[in-house]
Image (spheres, rainbow, N blue to C red):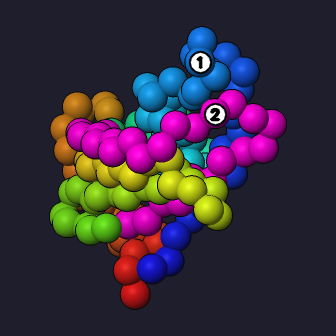
């Protein structure tokens, strides 16, 4: 599978009193990776971005091991698991070379923020997504 990898920095404030990264912050790490992945696809024009937005409709996280605060970033691998007319599924692994901390997925809807309605994925968006899909 092809994937996008984001080396996500950990922040001191992300850790709980036990030194573990708080489980709710895994959603933020996934969002950071997804946002970085999509930066080249997003327009510099705010109006275009409002008409061609993406919203998360569902998130699922399976925690596998505690992630302790440290100076080194953790890898967030993102893959495209499926694409339909107006939605796509992303899968994530939050891990190091030797340990997996979480596996997750998000369902994403192509959305027009101005009309507040779903929209169809464009050809450019489908082409972009295909770069990170199973071969």
Report the predominant secondary structure element of the magenta stretch.
strand
Callout 1: helix, strand or loop? loop
Find out whether the residues at labels 2 and 1 contact each other: C-beta distance under 8 Å. no
Residue 11 vs 29, above or below: the answer is: above
Where residue 31 appears, as percent x and y from the top left, is 49, 40
User: Residue 18: in sight, yes or no?
Assistant: yes
Dot 2 surroundings within 10 Å: few (below 14), some, or many (20 or more)?
some
Farthest-out residue, top: 17
Residue at x-position 29% and y-position 58%: 89
Q: Which quadrant of the figure contains the C terminus?
A: bottom left
Residue underneath mark 2 = 68
Q: On the rendered structure, is 100 left or right of 14?
A: left
Question: Which range of residues does the magenta coloring cover?
Answer: 56-80
Callout 2: helix, strand or loop? loop
Residue at x-position 57% and y-position 38%: 67
Give whichever of 96, 51 is nearer the camera: 96
Residue 119 vs 27, above or below: the answer is: below
Residue 107 vs 135, above or below: the answer is: above
Give whichever of 2, 102 is nearer the camera: 102
Residue underneath mark 1 = 18
Dot 1 surroundings within 10 Å: few (below 14), some, or many (20 or more)?
few
Q: On the rendered structure, is 17 left or right of 56?
A: right
């Amino acid at each position: 599978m092809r994937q996008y990898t984001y080396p996500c920095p950990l922040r001191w404030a992300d850790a709980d009193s036990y030194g573990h990264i708080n489980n709710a912050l895994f959603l933020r790490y996934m969002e950071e990776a997804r946002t970085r992945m999509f930066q080249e696809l997003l327009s510099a024009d705010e109006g275009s971005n409002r008409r061609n937005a993406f919203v998360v409709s569902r998130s699922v996280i399976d925690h596998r091991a505690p992630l302790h605060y440290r100076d080194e970033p953790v890898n967030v691998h993102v893959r495209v698991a499926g694409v339909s007319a107006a939605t796509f599924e992303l899968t994530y692994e939050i891990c190091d070379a030797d340990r997996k901390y979480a596996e997750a997925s998000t369902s994403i809807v192509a959305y027009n923020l101005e009309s507040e309605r779903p929209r169809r994925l464009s050809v450019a968006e489908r082409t972009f997504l295909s770069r990170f899909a199973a071969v």
